Image (spheres, grey):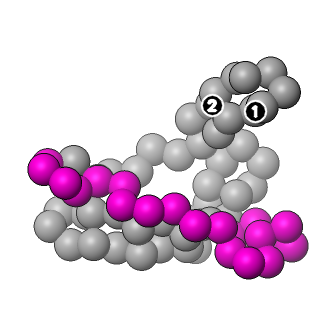
Amino acid sequence: MYDPRTHAQRVIAKLAVNDDAENGLIGLALDPAFLRNHWVYLNRTVGWNHRLARFTLDGDSLRDE
């Protein structure tokens, strides 16, 4: 996570991904109601399969849904 006020960066999650070739973290999106529900969607490669998963940003960490 990046704090624009202090320019500090923090790791908020460590997720397994296949980073071979053009795989890895493919995309990230915030839910339209993010300010209320804090949901974050990640599209990533696990093994040779693409996974879309929803997480909740909880303070300085991502909780798996």
Whether the residues at callouts 2 and 1 have beta carbons within 8 Å, the answer is: yes
Between 64 and 9, which is closer to the camera in this rendering?
A: 9
Residue occupying image coordinates x 14% and y 67%: 48
Q: Secondary structure at mark 2?
A: loop
- Image quarter hosting the N terminus: top right
The tag on residue 3 is 1
Asked which secondary structure carries label 1, the reply is: strand
How many numbered circles are shown? 2
Q: Nearer the viewer, residue 61 or 31?
A: 31
Q: Is residue 42 covered in magenta? A: no
Q: Can you give x and y, in whole percent of width and height, for residue 33 in the image?
A: 79, 77
Q: Which residues are magenta?
A: 20-39
Residue type indicated by callout 1: Asp
| Image position, residue 44 (x, y; %) | 35, 63
Q: CA distance from mark 2 to mark 1?
A: 9 Å
Tell me where residue 29 appears, x and y as whole percent. Answer: 58, 67
Q: Which residue in the structure is indicated by mark 2?
A: 10
Q: Tell me the quarter of the image containing the C terminus.
A: bottom right
Is residue 45 rendered to the left or right of residue 13? left
* Amino acid identity at mark 2: Arg
Q: Quadrant of residue 64?
A: bottom right
Q: Is 40 positioned to the left or the right of 4 in the image?
A: left
Residue drawn at (70%, 23%) of the image: 8
* Up-down relation of residue 33 to residue 19 (above or below): below
Q: Residue at x 78, y 48 (%)?
A: 59
Label 2 neighbour load within 10 Å: few <14, some 14-19, many 20+: few
